[in-house]
Image: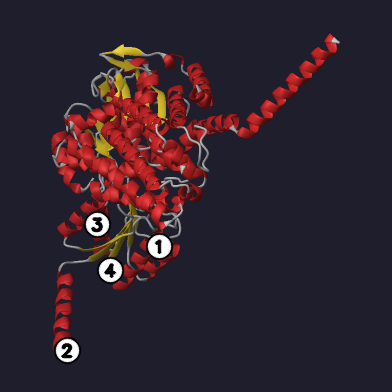
Amino acid sequence: MTAKTLLTTVAALALTATAAMADGETIGFSQIGSESGWRAAETTLTRNQAEERGYQLQFSDAQQKQENQIAAIRSFIAQGVDAILLAPVVATGWDSVLAEAKEAEIPVVLLDRQVDSSDDMYLTAVGSNLVHEGEVAGQWLVDNVGDEECRIVELQGTTGSSPAIDRKTGFENAIKDHANLEIVRSQTGDFTRAQGKEVMESFLQAENGGQDICALYAHNDDMAVGAIQAIKEAGLKPGEDILIVSIDGVPDIFQAMAAGEANATVELTPNMAGPAFDALEAYWADGTEPEKFIQTESKLYTQADDPAGEYEARKGLGY
Amino acid sequence: MSLLRRIAPQLVALLILFALVSVVFPGFLSVSLNDGRLVGPVIDVLKRGAPVALLSIGMTLVIATRGIDLSVGTTMAICGAAAAAVIAAGWGLPAALAVALAAGAAAGLWNGVLVAIVGIQPFVATLILMTMGRGIAQLITEGCILTFSDAGLAFFGSGTLLGLPVPAWLWIVGGLGVAALMRRTALGLLIEAIGINRRASALAGVNATVLVIAVYVAAGLCAALAGIVVTADIRGADANNAGLWLELDAILAVVIGGNSLLGGRFSVIASILGAMIIQTIDTGVLLAGFPPEYNLVIKAVLVLMILVLQSPRIAAEWRLWRDSQRASRAAAERRQAS
C-alpha cells in the first residue's frame, strides 16, 4: 500500500516536472504586498503576462516586510527558478541575497523601485521616470492653454516623498519657459482623496471662489478625484472652468474624464512585467545584456482617448 | 455661568487664532449666502472639524474614566467601509447607517469588555483594534477605494441643512445632546467618580463595569458617525487613509479642552472647542499659502503655545505675580495715605 502510494506520488511528481518544462520557464515574483490599488493591478498584470507567455509564476506576497522578501528570494534560488522579479520594499540591504542569486546564475529584474546595490548585481530595473511624468503633464497644459494667462494650483503628494518631489520638478521644468503659466498655490494633499478635497476647498476660498484658478495639477489621480468634488460643490464645472491634469491613470479618473470632469492623466503603467519579460527573453536567447534601467512609457490620456473604454479595461485589474 | 468660566480659555484661544488667521488671510471671517447655504472659510472650519469634533465627544467620556481609546481612527475606517459596502450592495440608506453604527458600537463593546471585564490597560486594549482594524476595513473594501454615488449617503458629507453643512450639525447636536445628558442627569458625576477612583465609586454603589463599557461604546458610536462623514464626503471608503491618526487629534482636542488625561472632571463642550481650535489652525495654514513643509511645524508651535498658556503651573505663577503686584500697590497707597 505504502509502496503503491509512493509510486503514484513519484509518478505524479514526474508528470508535474515534465508539465513544468513543457510550459516554459519558471519565474519567481517577490511582490511588496498589497499597499495600494496600483500594486494590486501590477500583480494582476504580471500574472496575466506570465500566463500569456506560458511561464510558471511563483508568487510571493511579502506583506511590506523585507525579511519576507529575502526569504522568498532564497526559496526561489533553492527551487532553481529561471528568473526572479523583485519589487523591493526598501532600497537598502539587498547585497547578500542578490549575490546569492548571482552565484546561482539566476537573473534578477527589479520592478518599479530601485535598490542601492551596485548595478552588476541585477540584470536590469524596470520603472517609470517620475520627473518625466511631471513633464508630460506640464507639457499637456502648455499645449492646451496657448498664450492665455493661466494661474495653476498644485496638489502635492506626501511632503518629502520622491514622487512628490520629482513630479513637482518635472511639471515646473515643462512650464518654466512660459511666463503666462504660473503656479499660484501649492499644498500637500498626502496622495489621498479626502485631503485632496479639503485642500482644494481652501484653494477655492483663497482664489476668489475659484474664479481666479485656470488649472489644477495633482500629483496623483486620487487627489484630483477629491478636488473635482470640491470644485463641483463650489458651483464650478471641473474640466471646463478649471482644467484638471493628474498622474497615475487609475480607473476612477477615466470615469471622470468620460464625464468631462477631468482633462488629462499621465499613466504610470502597472505593466512593469511586460518589459521585464522582454528583456529576460532576449537574455535567455543569446545572453543580451539589457540597459540597466528600462524606462516605461508615460502615456498621456485625454478625453479624446476613449476614457470610457479605458475605464472598462482597467476596472477589473484590482485597482 | 460656570460653563462660560470653564470654557473661557478655549474661547479666548479660538478668538486669538481667528485674529491670527485673519492677519495672514484677510477674508477669513467673511461669510456669504450662496443658493441658501453659507459659504466661507469659517463654515469650512465647522465642516472640516466635524470628524475630530465627533471623536472628541466620545474621547472626552473615555478619558474622564481614566481610559483612552486609540482605536477610534481605525473604527472610522471600518464603519465607513461598512456603510459604503452596504450602499454598494443596494440595501439602501437606512441599512447603511444602521450597519455602520452597529459596527461602531461593536468596536466600542470589544474595547469596553477588554478594559472593564478582562482588565487590560486601556492603552493596550484599544491598541489591538487600532492595529488590526485597518485590516478589517481593507477586507470589507477588498483593498480598493469603494466608491458609490448614492445621494442620500453623500448628504451626510456634503449636504446642507438650514444653511449649515450637515457634518457641522452632527457635532453641534451630538455635542450639546451629550453635554446635556451628562449635566442634566447624574451620569456625568458617576463617570467622573469612576475616573477619580474606580474602586471607591464601585464600593459606593456605582456600576462601574457597565458605565466603563458604555463610554467605550459611546466612543465607538461617535467614531461611526465620523466615519460616515468622511466616507460620504469623498463618496468612497478609503480603508487605508480614512481616519488615519485622527485618534491623536481627538486626544489633543480633549487636552486642549483642558481635560486631564488622569480622568475625573470633564467638559464635552471644551473638548469640541479644542477640536475647532485644531481645525482653525489646519485651515489657517492651508489658506495662508505657506509651503507645505511648514504645516506641521506651525501646528506644533501653536498647539504648544496654547497648552503652555493653559498650564495650571503657569496660571498659578501668574496669579501669584498679580497678587504680589496688587499687594505692593496697596502697600504703596497705604504709605502715601499715611
Q: Earlier in the sequence, mark 1 or mark 3?
A: 1
Nearer the camera: disc 3 or disc 4: 4
Question: Residue A4 at x, y = what percent?
Answer: 13, 88
Q: Earlier in the sequence, mark 2 or mark 1?
A: 2
Residue indicated by mark 2:
A2
Q: Nearer the viewer, mark 3 or mark 2?
A: 2
Residue that label 4 marks: A81
Closer mark to the observer between disc 4 and disc 2? 2
Q: Which amino acid, mark 4?
A: Val
Any mark on residue A277, and which? 3
- For the residues labelled 1 and 3, the Cα–Cα distance comes to 25 Å
Of the residues under marks 3 and 2, which one precedes in the sequence? Answer: 2
Marks 3/2 in contact by CB < 8 Å: the verdict is: no
Residue A194 showing in the rendered view: yes
| Chain letter for the residue marked with disc 3 in the picture | A
Element carrying mark 4: loop
